[in-house]
């Protein structure tokens, strides 16, 4: 069995997943880097983790496929004999908007739920015995979409609401051995949004976001990764939490109170 702890990070070729895998590598973890399509980026993410001192496995697999989930976890156990942390980061959306319902057909809706919700559950199911043995941690990368009912599409909003509910259930079901939490980012300055809505729309959205949130800034991938790593490495008495990383967006706009004239 490996003396180093082991983390399985889904969707870790780019963005939050890659930043989380690299951050955990710097903290002494061996890393299973998972991807479904972005092979070149996954190779780069794996190389960065190795450079940071981790032993790595590169695993191509779609988390909506239960057999692929089992194979990934099996590969980690064969290599290292343990899994200490699972980060359910793999996720997809359809940038259809929240009122253009006709843009979402059944197969698209089911595909989003299959990756974002069922995929997360299947990874938990495959990892659970090993996480219990290690007294490990699970962090689900959710979204303010699931907390506030806003986002790129109705299907995405529904999927992240389900991830949040799943997090609460799993925190109870896997206690006391395993802690389960979720992070719920707002706007993240990664290519995911740019690819989804185009650079001009993204820049407009980012400007609106920064003007309307108390902290006045979007998250970076590293900001989210830092919170994920804290929930894994620290937060020893924290489970069942949905951590909002939205620069205070959930607070709404502040009211300006003008005192009456004397």
Image (spheres, rainbow, N blue to C red):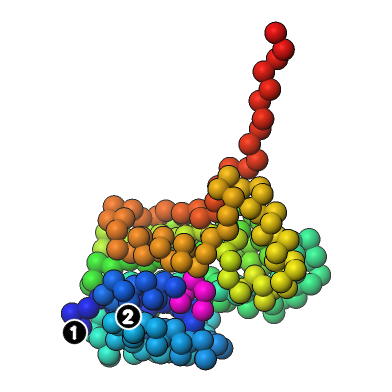
**In this picture, is 58 found above or below 188?**
below
Q: Nearer the viewer, mark 2 or mark 1?
A: 2
Residue drawn at (29%, 52%) of the image? 237
Judge from the rendering whether residue 186 lies leftward or rightward of residue 140; answer left or right. right
Quadrant holding the N terminus: bottom left
Residue 21: which quarter of the image?
bottom left
Residue drawn at (73%, 73%) of the image? 198
Q: Which residue is mark 2?
A: 52
Q: Is residue 84 magenta?
A: no
In this orientation, which residue lies closer to the viewer: 99 or 27?
27
Q: Is residue 16 magenta?
A: yes
Q: Which residue is mark 1?
A: 1
Say if residue 166 shows up in the picture: no
Judge from the rendering whether residue 103 lies leftward or rightward of residue 71; answer left or right. right
Decide whether the magenta segment is chiefly helix, strand or loop.
helix
Say if residue 16 shows up in the picture: yes
**In this picture, is 83 found above or below 47?**
above
Quadrant holding the C terminus: top right
In this orientation, which residue lies closer to the viewer: 44 or 97?
44
- Which residue range is magenta in the image? 14-18
């Amino acid at each position: 069995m490996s003396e180093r702890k082991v983390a399985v990070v889904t969707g870790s070729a780019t963005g939050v997943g890659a930043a989380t895998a690299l951050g955990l590598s710097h903290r002494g973890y061996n890393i299973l880097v998972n991807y479904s399509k972005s092979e070149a980026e996954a190779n780069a993410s794996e190389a960065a983790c190795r450079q940071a001192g981790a032993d790595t496995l590169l695993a191509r697999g779609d988390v909506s496929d239960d057999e692929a989930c089992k194979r990934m976890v099996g590969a980690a156990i064969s290599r290292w004999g343990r899994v200490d942390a699972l980060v359910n980061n793999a996720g997809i959306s359809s940038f259809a908007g929240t009122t253009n319902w006709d843009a979402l057909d059944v197969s698209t809706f089911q595909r989003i739920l299959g990756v974002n919700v069922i995929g997360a559950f299947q990874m938990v199911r495959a990892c659970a015995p090993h996480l219990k043995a290690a007294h490990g941690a699970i962090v689900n990368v959710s979204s303010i979409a699931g907390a506030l009912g806003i986002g790129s599409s109705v299907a995405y909003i529904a999927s992240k609401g389900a991830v949040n509910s799943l997090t609460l259930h799993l925190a109870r079901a896997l206690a006391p051995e395993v802690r389960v939490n979720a992070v719920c980012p707002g706007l993240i300055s990664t290519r995911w949004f740019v690819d989804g809505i185009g650079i001009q729309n993204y820049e407009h959205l980012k400007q609106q976001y920064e003007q309307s949130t108390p902290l006045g800034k979007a998250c970076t991938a590293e900001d989210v990764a830092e919170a994920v790593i804290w929930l894994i490495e620290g937060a020893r008495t924290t489970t069942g939490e949905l951590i909002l990383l939205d620069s205070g967006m959930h607070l709404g706009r502040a009211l300006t109170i003008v005192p009456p004239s004397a």
